Image: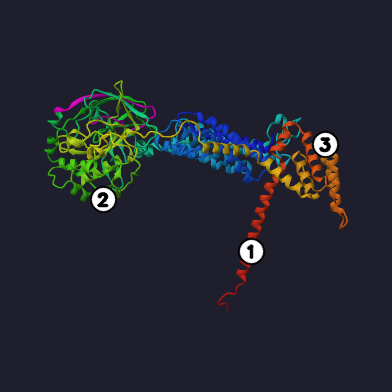
């Protein structure tokens, strides 16, 4: 195997070994075999193009084209195509699947399921890195620079995976792959020098170039390079283990620490934004079930699973303030603010919950207010928000709810509108802490709150009016595609645009409540989910939700629902003033965007406007397809035929080019042009051209190396004789050769007949003389560059000759 072929092999191997680090991102390794096969094809195309040889740019272009065609044929048809014909099948559909993969990456926790979109991203990413490595190490002959794309691939994988127990093994594979690539290049360079000067060979060993000793053992330079690589790789693995205080680094991830915030060993909750993935969950195409539970609650529609409360609005975003954590008590303390008679009418319910293996939330979802929790693992309790938080298990590793099964006992509170309306003033400490607003909050927020609640004489009535303003009579629309936004201006924009999803409604109502002096915060969690026939309730990603909690003395933190979304249960205590306009039962899953107008007749023409805003009037029946019968359309058939011709014609381009060039040359009737065609034909058959030979000697060489029979050999000699006459005949002498084209074709037939079957096929499909295209392109590029350089030099000289004003 040649040195360049070894370089190609080790470049692909280094890419493949580094790609192993991506396995931690997904729950299946099935993609790696496909990536390895496509990478092998891409490398083989590059090796073949360099052997022709083609120019470097054409070599890379051939690899890119081959990889794109393979990816398109493997993944086309798996996305959401909205067109017809091969263009939609290979381009539109391919792009849609790529976009779906990007969305899947943002929606799923690591390790993510191996969806078609994520699989496409992984395979195409490996092919891209493999192309860069192959170009740098083999085409450009700079293997050291090929470490940059390999490092980028490993860094991205390690950063997303957040380190872990297997990260050292991934680093070892990546490092070994890169070192083998460097050693392969070093061997190739040493082999080009000839004799290797190093340690003396062992007794009886013949000089074998790079082997340098008996049995093919490496000589001193190669051995020294191996030792340096092994020592360096060992140090990279051993130093972080010996010095753990360094933290992070190449083998360690800090994702959990950065996400959960703060140092220590689980002593506090620092600033955390759990709403990062809420919008993507609502827009998820794959609506996976994350929680399942069974409860004895008589009001399953009120069984919200609360994760945590965001109680601090710092002018940029709502977040959970840093609070001390304590050990989880056997019985949780009384909920803040809950007093008789509401506490006496409360019913304790039991809920058994199981979390999916792919749900890695650090905060425990449970009904509010919980009185006790039975769960294994290391958990801590935050009393103010009544939240259970996973404790730290090790460096950059925390307890989470993944795959957990736990039981929660909680209170089902049933406050009445009268109890809330007659609630006394809240505790001054609560009032001060939960009514804080940033100084830069736009005045329109407080002004709108005062206008909406005008005439209300108590906090409860103000809260209900705010809820109705957003959910019923304010003209707001529910749309999960709206950007969530941050900062105090986001509330003002939402009030002006009147379009958003649960985050906008919860944040805005909480901010407006605080401006009215009502203690408020935002809760994050899940709506009750959908009950199944077996009695279990499934909670999926699209049930993710945010809602405001307002504080009333004697009741405590109380849920309100300003979001006008189908499937939302308005609390019974907030329906006192508008009983006819509230939904009474959970509806189907939420709409993913603003509802589009229907062209069909309404099923309930008498539906009140308020219920229409809440999505309780039902949906129009889907329009029936009026398309024709089965069978593809004429446009589709023609498109597929054109695509088949293009795909089949691509490998035939060199042959078609040679056929066209041969016809043009022979049509001229010129002896020298025909002689050039004969030389290219012999070159295609393996007889390399030699411009230093005379026509007669060149003809003899073609006959001898091409193993021509008597008739083709005679035709070659006749053409050579005509060339001599054309070159050396006296001026004015007429040189006529009517059989010129026939003799060239006869010689070509003899060259093809003397070749075996596979070489003959290569002569036809991949003629060596096609390299003239690359040469012509390179010459044209050089000529253009020289002309531009000449013009720039002339212009610079002219500028220098211009007289300077003010001289002397």
Callout 2 touching callout 3 (CB < 8 Å): no
Label 1 crowding class (10 Å Cα cut-off): few <14, some 14-19, many 20+? few
Residue indicated by mark 3: 708
Residue indicated by mark 1: 793
Q: In the picture, residue 523 is in which quadrant?
A: top left
Label 3 crowding class (10 Å Cα cut-off): few <14, some 14-19, many 20+? many
- Judged from the image, the secondary structure of the residue bearing numbered disc 1 is helix
349 inside magenta stretch: yes
- Judged from the image, the secondary structure of the residue bearing numbered disc 2 is loop
Which image quarter holds the N terminus? top right
* Residue 532 position in % (x across, y down): 31, 24
Nearest to N terminus: mark 2 or mark 3: 2
Front residue of this view, candidates 197 and 329: 329
Residue indicated by mark 2: 441
Q: Is residue 696 left or right of residue 493?
A: right
Nearest to N terminus: mark 2 or mark 1: 2
Q: Is residue 626 left or right of residue 179?
A: left
Nearest to N terminus: mark 3 or mark 1: 3
Residue 133 in view (yes/no): no
Q: CA distance from mark 3 to mark 1?
A: 54 Å
* Residue 433 position in % (x across, y down): 21, 43
Q: In the picture, residue 588 is in which quadrant?
A: top left
766 inside magenta stretch: no
Q: CA distance from mark 2 to mark 3?
A: 93 Å
**Vertical position of residue 186 compared to residue 806: above or below:** above
Front residue of this view, candidates 308 and 222: 308
Tell me the colour scheme of the image: rainbow
Callout 2 touching callout 1 (CB < 8 Å): no
Label 2 crowding class (10 Å Cα cut-off): few <14, some 14-19, many 20+? many
Residue interval drawn in magenta: 344-368
């Amino acid at each position: 195997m040649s040195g360049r072929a070894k370089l190609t092999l080790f470049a692909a191997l280094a890419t493949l070994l580094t790609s192993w680090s991506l396995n931690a991102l997904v729950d299946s390794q099935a993609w790696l075999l496909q990536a390895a096969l496509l990478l092998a094809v891409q490398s083989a195309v590059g090796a073949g193009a360099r052997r022709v040889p083609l120019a470097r740019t054409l070599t890379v272009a051939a690899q890119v084209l081959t990889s794109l065609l393979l990816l398109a044929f493997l993944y086309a048809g798996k996305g959401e195509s909205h067109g017809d014909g091969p263009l939609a099948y290979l381009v539109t559909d391919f792009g849609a699947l790529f976009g779906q993969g990007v969305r899947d990456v943002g929606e799923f926790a690591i390790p993510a399921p191996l969806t078609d979109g994520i699989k496409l991203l992984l395979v195409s990413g490996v092919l891209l890195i493999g192309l860069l490595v192959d170009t740098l190490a083999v085409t450009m002959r700079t293997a050291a620079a090929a470490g940059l794309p390999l490092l980028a691939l490993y860094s991205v994988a390690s950063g997303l995976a957040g380190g872990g127990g297997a990260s050292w093994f991934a680093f070892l594979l990546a490092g070994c792959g890169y070192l083998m690539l460097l050693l392969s290049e070093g061997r190739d360079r040493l082999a080009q020098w000839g004799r290797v000067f190093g340690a003396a060979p062992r007794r009886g060993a013949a000089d074998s170039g790079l082997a340098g000793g008996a049995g093919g053992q490496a000589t001193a330079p190669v051995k020294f390079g191996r030792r340096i690589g092994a020592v360096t790789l060992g140090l990279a693995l051993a130093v972080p283990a010996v010095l753990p205080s360094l933290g992070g680094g190449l083998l360690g991830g800090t994702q959990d620490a950065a996400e959960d915030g703060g140092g220590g060993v689980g002593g506090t909750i620092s600033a955390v934004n759990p709403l990062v993935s809420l919008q993507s969950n609502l827009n998820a195409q794959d609506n996976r079930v994350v929680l399942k539970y069974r409860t004895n609650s008589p009001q399953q529609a009120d069984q919200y699973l609360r994760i945590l409360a965001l109680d601090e609005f710092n002018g940029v975003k709502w977040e959970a303030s840093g609070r001390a954590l304590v050990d989880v008590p056997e019985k949780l303390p009384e909920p803040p603010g809950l007093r008789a008679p509401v506490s006496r009418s409360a019913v304790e319910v039991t809920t058994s919950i199981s979390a999916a293996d792919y749900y890695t939330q650090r905060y425990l979802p449970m009904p509010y207010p919980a009185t006790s929790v039975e769960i294994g693992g290391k958990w801590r309790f935050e009393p103010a928000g009544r939240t259970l938080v996973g404790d730290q298990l090790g460096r950059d590793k925390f307890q989470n709810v993944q795959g957990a099964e736990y039981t929660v006992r909680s209170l089902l509170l049933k406050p009445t509108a009268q109890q809330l309306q007659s609630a006394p003033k809240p505790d001054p400490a609560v009032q001060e802490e939960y009514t804080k607003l940033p100084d830069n909050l736009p005045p329109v927020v407080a002004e709108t709150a005062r206008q909406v609640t005008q005439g209300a004489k108590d906090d409860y009535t103000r809260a209900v009016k705010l809820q109705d303003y957003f959910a019923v009579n304010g003209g707001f629309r529910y749309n999960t595609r709206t950007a969530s936004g941050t900062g105090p201006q986001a509330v003002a924009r939402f009030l002006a645009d009147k379009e958003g999803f649960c985050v906008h409604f919860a944040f805005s109502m909480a901010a407006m409540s605080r401006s009215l002096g009502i203690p408020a915060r935002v809760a994050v969690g899940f709506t009750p989910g959908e009950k199944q026939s077996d009695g279990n309730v499934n909670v999926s990603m699209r049930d993710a939700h945010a809602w405001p909690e307002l504080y009333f003395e004697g009741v405590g933190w109380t849920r309100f629902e300003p979001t006008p979304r189908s499937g939302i249960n308005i609390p019974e205590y907030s329906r006192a003033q508008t009983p006819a306009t509230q939904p009474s039962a959970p509806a189907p899953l939420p709409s993913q965007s603003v509802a589009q107008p229907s062209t069909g007749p309404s099923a309930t023409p008498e539906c009140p406007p308020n219920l229409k805003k809440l999505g309780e009037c039902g949906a129009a029946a889907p329009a029936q397809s009026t398309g024709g019968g089965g069978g593809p359309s004429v446009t589709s058939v023609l498109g597929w035929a054109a695509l088949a011709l293009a795909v089949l014609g691509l490998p035939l381009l060199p042959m078609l080019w040679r056929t066209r060039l041969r016809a043009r040359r022979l049509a001229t009737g010129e002896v020298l042009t025909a002689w050039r065609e004969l030389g290219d034909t012999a070159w295609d058959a393996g007889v390399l051209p030699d411009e230093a030979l005379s026509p007669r000697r060149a003809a003899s060489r073609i006959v001898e190396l091409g193993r021509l029979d008597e008739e083709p050999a005679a035709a070659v000699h006749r053409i050579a004789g005509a060339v001599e006459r054309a070159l050396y005949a006296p001026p004015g002498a007429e040189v006529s050769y009517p059989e010129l084209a026939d003799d060239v074709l006869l010689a070509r037939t003899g060259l093809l007949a003397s070749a075996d079957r596979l070489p003959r096929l290569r002569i036809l499909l991949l003629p060596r003389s096609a390299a003239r295209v690359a040469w012509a392109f390179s010459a044209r590029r050089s000529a253009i560059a020289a002309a531009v350089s000449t013009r720039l030099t002339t212009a610079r000289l002219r500028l220098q000759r211009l007289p300077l004003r003010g001289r002397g």
